[in-house]
Image (spheres, rainbow, N blue to C red):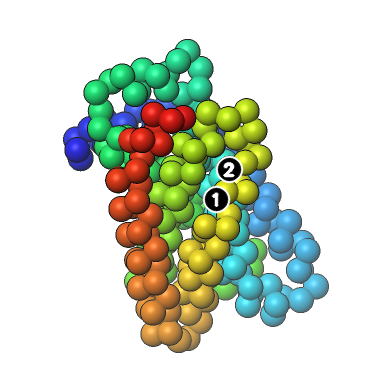
Amino acid sequence: MLRDAALVAGKDLRIELRSKVATNQVLPFSILVLILFAFALDADRGLLSSVAAGLFWVTVLFSGLLAIQRSFAIESGDDARDALRLSGLDGASVFLGKAAAVTVQLLALEVLLAVGAVVLYDVSLTGAALLTATCLLATAGIAAAGVIYGAVAAGLRVRETLLPLLLLPVLAPVLLAAARASEAALGATSADGWPWVRLLAVFSAVYLAFGVAAFGPLLEEA
């Protein structure tokens, strides 16, 4: 299963590298969102620093929607989705591969956004281990839930507008926990963030387990 998942992830990542959609569209969009937040709250630098973690994860979430939609859009033409279903790959492998590809893209994006947040929002990092664990778990949860609901919306004409409506309420707990843990990592009380990290681990495990069990039937229905 892991070997097949690696094949799917490699396919998606190679397509993104060749198309350069992530670098030409998703990354500029993310940077613009960070800059707009900075301009909107520039009059109060203290407030900007205090809400930097929340703004960071809102930006990641919006960018994740673009990455997830792109993950399924690349298979919408030339009956590629039917070819994927007929390839003999297990649904769990396809799910893990697509979720891994989205996770890699978002983690790379988060590194660049973190640099932008430090520059624009005047924040300092004091809990590197806490922030790393938060990013890994939150990104895995966003990718897993996104791939599940991306498969649900993939076969519909209104998928571009339906996916955010389905996904954002589900990811609200992940966004809250990631923001709280990141606030602790950026402050002087890193110990306060680890309970939120454990909550993130629970949500990520639930989304991953559900995706492994249900993605095959969802892919067939799509």
Circle 2 Cα neighbour tier, 10 Å, few/some/many (<14 / 14–19 / ≥20): many
Q: Quadrant of the N terminus?
A: top left
Residue at image position (43%, 30%) is 221
Above or below residue 46? Residue 69 is above
Residue 71 vs residue 130, the one in the foreground: 71
Q: Callout 1, which amino acid?
A: Leu
Residue at image position (53%, 28%) is 155
Is 78 left or right of 214, judged from the image as shown?
Answer: right
Is 72 left or right of 56, judged from the image as shown?
Answer: left
Above or below residue 79? Residue 18 is below
Where does the image place residue 139, in percent across and percent down from the top left? Answer: 43, 55
Q: Quadrant of residue 65?
A: top right
Q: Residue furthest right?
A: 43
Is 37 left or right of 207, judged from the image as shown?
Answer: right
Dots 2, 1 in contact, CB < 8 A = yes
Secondary structure under tag 2 reads helix
Q: Callout 2, which amino acid?
A: Leu
Circle 1 Cα neighbour tier, 10 Å, few/some/many (<14 / 14–19 / ≥20): some
Asked whether residue 132 is in view, the answer is no
> For mark 2, what is the residue?
163
Residue at image position (46%, 74%) is 181
Where does the image place residue 210, in percent across and percent down from the top left? Answer: 34, 51
Secondary structure under tag 1 reads helix
> For mark 1, what is the residue?
167
**Numbered badge on residue 59:** none
